[in-house]
Image (tube, helix red, strand yellow):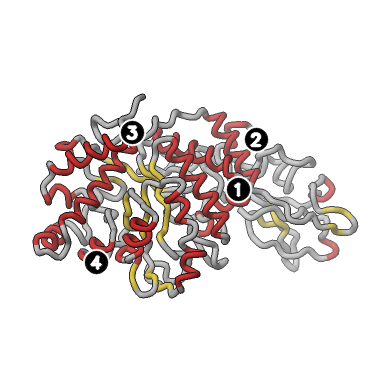
């Protein structure tokens, strides 16, 4: 497929923009519904579909009618330190998105693990901004190589669980630059991400969707040419948000723009040039993902992956995230590998595997592996096959029956029962050291 030059595409976008009325332009700047953007037949713009991520492409449905490849937790991806592997998984996600008719994936999440209480940490890569940045660049590159827009989020300093929607993060310039903005910058500059999501929280007294950083840092200093969208319901004003650099209010069709933004433009409080810039960015995004008639997408759309290839990639990706820091000795023997003797007499059932985190990032997997009778004794007598893990939800396609969730010995005063999937395990007493070693938390 031969693609026109960037200059030619930009000229075409500006020509189409010039044909729109103010009302048509403003309508495009708020979502059509919870997961999609308005079409505009007059300029050949079709409906664009957005979907949550980052551990799978959920699509517009939230149930088992439209299952997903359940990609390993982003925290596990970062633990692999493997940029090439993460880029491949990004390509897998692009194929999944195209299979579901999704143009824009709301991922990666590059906020930092600042506290163990962060309920959405499973969506994030690391507490380290450099590692987060490198894995985030690979993720965005892989996804966009398949013709699906990545949306790096949540800009910026949305790292606290307490009062997530309203917290005012007070941070000095150096910490802001070296920690919180640091993962975003290379994803914008190197990966050329096509969308950014502005967060709920405030930074130094100004809410993120109205913050000067959207224009001054993101667009002016870093040269970001894509769309800045709000997190869902994070847009709280008309003029401050429009003048600060927010481009798209989500979800729709209601919101603080619409007729109020039209009135603000006609009253001279928001310039029409600012509205034009927002619409141009939206059209540029549409062109990149192939949503504008007469303009070829930036890259060829991702081809479908077979079930067997998906299962193998997920298993290998999840296995790469298991990092053994120390194989401690107990009673003169290393805890790992497990043996039949260590597991003997310790039943462990995992009827409900922990295969995803909560929140908007949840995506229903295509299948959920369950433990076999032998594996209910906290593991078979030999080590699991490479890639066996809870994170590969399509593992059932390979016939694997390895336990899908970690088993840890849990004791009460009167029973020797075990619990699966809890973390951290209680340290064993002297007479309990034949119990299985703890595995990575789910």
Q: Mark 3 vs mark 2: which is more N-terminal?
A: 3
Labels 2 and 1: the sequence-earlier one: 1
Packing grade of label 2 (10 A; few <14, some 14-19, many >=20) is some
Quadrant of the rendering where the N terminus is positioned: top left
| Residue 45 seen anywhere in this rendered image of the structure | yes
The numbered dot on residue 240 is 4
Question: For residue 206, what is the image quadrant?
Answer: bottom left
> Residue at label 2?
400
Along the line of sight, the residue nearer the viewer: 346 or 434: 434
Could you give the CA–CA distance between mark 4 and mark 1, rounded to whole angstroms? 51 Å
**Number of other residues with Cα within 10 Å of mark 3, as a class: few under 14, some 14 to 19, many 20 or more:** many
Q: Which residue is mark 1?
A: 351
**x 22%, y 52%: residue:** 253
**Residue topped by disc 3:** 297
Query: Closer to us: mark 2 or mark 1?
Result: 2
Secondary structure, mark 2, is loop
**Which residue appears at 45% of the width and 71% of the height?**
173
Q: Helix, strand or loop at disc 4?
A: helix
User: Which of the marked residues, 2 or 4, is nearer the chain's N terminus?
Assistant: 4
């Amino acid at each position: 497929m031969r693609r026109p030059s960037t200059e030619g595409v930009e000229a075409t976008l500006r020509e189409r923009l010039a044909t729109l009325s103010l009302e048509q332009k403003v309508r495009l700047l708020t979502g059509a519904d919870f997961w999609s953007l308005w079409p505009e037949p007059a300029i050949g713009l079709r409906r664009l579909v957005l979907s949550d991520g980052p551990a799978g492409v959920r699509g517009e449905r939230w149930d088992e009618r439209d299952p997903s490849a359940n990609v390993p937790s982003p925290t596990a991806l970062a633990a692999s330190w493997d940029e090439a592997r993460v880029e491949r998984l990004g390509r897998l996600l692009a194929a999944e998105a195209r299979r579901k008719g999704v143009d824009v994936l709301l991922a990666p999440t590059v906020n930092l693990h600042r506290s163990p209480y962060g309920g959405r940490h499973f969506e994030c890569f690391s507490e380290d901004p450099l590692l987060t940045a490198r894995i985030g660049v690979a993720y965005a590159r892989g996804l966009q190589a398949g013709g699906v827009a990545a949306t790096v989020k949540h800009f910026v300093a949305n790292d606290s669980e307490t009062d997530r929607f309203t917290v005012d993060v007070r941070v000095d310039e150096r910490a802001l630059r070296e920690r919180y903005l640091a993962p975003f910058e290379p994803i914008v500059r190197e990966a050329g991400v096509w969308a950014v999501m502005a967060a709920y929280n405030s930074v130094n007294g100004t809410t993120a969707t109205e913050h000067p950083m959207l224009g001054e840092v993101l667009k002016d200093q870093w040269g970001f040419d894509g769309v800045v969208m709000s997190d869902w319901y994070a847009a709280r004003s008309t003029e401050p948000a429009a003048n600060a650099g927010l481009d798209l209010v989500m979800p729709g069709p209601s919101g603080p723009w619409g007729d109020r933004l039209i009135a603000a433009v006609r009253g001279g409080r928001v310039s029409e040039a600012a509205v034009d810039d927002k619409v141009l960015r939206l059209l540029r995004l549409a062109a990149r993902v192939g949503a504008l008639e007469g303009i070829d997408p930036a890259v060829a759309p991702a081809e479908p992956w077979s079930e067997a290839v998906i299962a193998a990639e997920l298993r290998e990706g999840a296995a790469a995230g298991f990092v053994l820091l120390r194989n401690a000795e107990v009673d003169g023997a290393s805890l790992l590998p497990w043996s039949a003797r260590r597991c003997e007499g310790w039943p462990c059932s995992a009827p409900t595997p922990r295969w995803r985190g909560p929140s908007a990032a949840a995506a229903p997997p295509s299948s959920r592996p369950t433990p076999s009778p032998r594996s209910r004794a906290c593991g078979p007598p030999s080590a699991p096959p490479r890639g066996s893990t809870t994170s590969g939800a399509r593992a059932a396609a390979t016939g694997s029956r390895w336990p899908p969730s970690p088993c840890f010995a849990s004791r009460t005063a009167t029973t020797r029962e075990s619990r699966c999937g809890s973390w951290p395990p209680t340290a064993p007493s002297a007479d309990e050291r034949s119990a299985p070693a703890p595995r990575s938390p789910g």
